[in-house]
Image (spheres, rainbow, N blue to C red):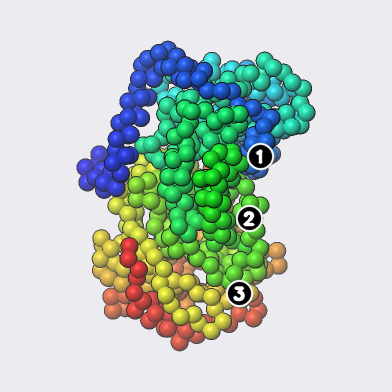
Amino acid sequence: MSIGRLWRTVRHLTAEQWVFRFVCRGQRLVMRHHPEFSRRRIDRAARRLPLPDPSSDSAVAIADIVLQLQMAVHGDSYEGAPEGKFTLLNRDYDFGGVEQVSWRGEFHEGNNPLRRMNLAYMGYAVPLLARGRAADLAAICALVKSLDQQNAWSAPGVFRDVWNAYTASHRLINLLSALALYRRAGGQRDAASEAVLLEHARFCAAFIRANLERDLQFNHLMKNYVALSAYAGMCAVPPAALGLLQAAVPKSIRQNVLPDGGQAERCPMYHVLSMLDVRVLAASGLFPETWQPALDETMARMEAALPVMTLADGEVALMNDSWIGEAPRADSVVDTGDTPPVTRIVDTGYVRLGQDGDSIVFDCGPCGPDDNPGHAHADFLSVEATAGGKRFLVDTGVPTYTAGTDRNASRSAAAHNGPRLIDAEPIEFWKSFRVGRRGYAGELDLTPPDGALITAGWQSGYAHLGTDVRRAVCLWPGRGLLIADLWRGAAMTAETRLLIPSEWAVAAGSTFSQDGTDLSAQALAGTLSAPEDAAHWYRFGVERKAHRLVLQPDLAKGEARAAVYFSWSPDAVIPDADVLAGLFVGLATAIPTAG
């Protein structure tokens, strides 16, 4: 353990996070070493809560929101749950029946419990029970009983996965939503099975209330509050024990949603998930005089921000810990079809350029909140892009959350489409979610060349090595994309890596084709390599082939310059030397924002 790295990590934590880091760990130790006493304590708290009514208007409204999410996650696989078959983060598991489900078995995830957590979320129950079949209700009832029986609180690690408060929050929302949809579908009433689900949800509510994730905060703590709000909203009278929500929820929203509407952890995928959470809060109907105006205003900001992080193919850019399939498509939750040619969310740090099917999303903001940047990647000044609605510059994505070589590589600067220094990192990553030293980024104000849409930015991730890094991005809709990179300072072992998905077949040299569209890449400054074999993870853990281009800059007088032009139209005009020189002068003289 490096004392310096540890200090660079923890010095950003707030006093509240420090206090609850000890409180939460202490509570988990007590629960593990005194499980019977702890369960009785939670059970007593649960008995004081009224049972929710899954037939209430708020329950049905919440369930419809949750169904949209769970159809995106489990829409192709939920029918197998009654037979003990599940697809968890793109891996199939067949336990041979609900009685044989092993909740904490081997899920091919190393030291990260994400698949075990996904199984215990029980999101598959939502579309399953929406069918209104009594056999499905019996199967979910059996799964709930199995989960309770197999996961003793004395078991090592049980509070990291099955009985993690974040997992319990998902499970509470999913079980109550599933039951609401079952009743709406006219499913045969089974008082005994329904009671199992309701009692488990009530126990989860008491468990979450006693184990709020005030050490981690951000999306975890917000999910805790959303679950408790859903529960309270389904009760005839909101429970007094959940009265903390009136003040806690607005505080959590202010932490998670930035003034420009972006999600504070700067993950487009989590932005969509957080939007759905805010919709659940609104559907709960709690505290309408105080919550509703703020929720309406928050939702308006978030809906306006999402198109800035969405490409012309209707999916979000995969910056930081984002992947496809964990949330509904962006264009299914907001209208992204009429986005202006240039849009930006300054606090979040994204700029979108686009027209018709041509678009780019440019990352020029912080890697995340300083007090919890766990989902950060070193994607400063990185871009993703589409031509004719087809993505041709892709982010590496997320192969795993498990600490180790693959996780480190996927978070590194080498894995992203940004300018970098070789053998150096702009962010000090360690373990799965730790961040020590970290750089920052911001937008630069540059004049666009004729006919172009432009954005530009700087990053300070290599300032400790004496190097300043800047990038300009120019899009000529319907024609081409120019990326120009400038490094200035002491360390000049630089390069730019660009990742093209294998759907674009290599035609010749640095020319690619897909469905009748030809895409060519040409170095205007520096030297462009031939395409190399590479990989990316569009969906979590699912490797797909890709082509990597490496652009080596020209070196002169303490500067390194690189520029590449992608064209996909016969009308494309290669930017001339004057255009390129003007961009580099602009990059060199632009004044960075503070950061």
Label number found at residue 334: 2
Query: How many badges with numbers are in the image?
Result: 3
Q: Marks 3/2: CA distance?
A: 23 Å
Q: Amino acid at mark 2?
A: Val
Question: On screen, 462 above or below 119?
Answer: below
| Quadrant of the image containing the N terminus | top left
Q: Amino acid at mark 3?
A: Pro
Q: Which of the two discs, 1 and 3, labels the residue nearer the N terminus?
A: 1
Residue under label 1, please give it: 61
Residue 38 at x, y = what percent? 41, 17
> Residue at point 61% right, 79% down?
572
Label number found at residue 477: 3
Q: Secondary structure at mark 3?
A: loop
User: Is the residue marked by circle 3 packed among few (<14), some (14-19), or many (20+) residues within 10 Å?
Assistant: many
Q: Secondary structure at mark 1?
A: helix
Q: Marks 1/3: CA distance?
A: 41 Å
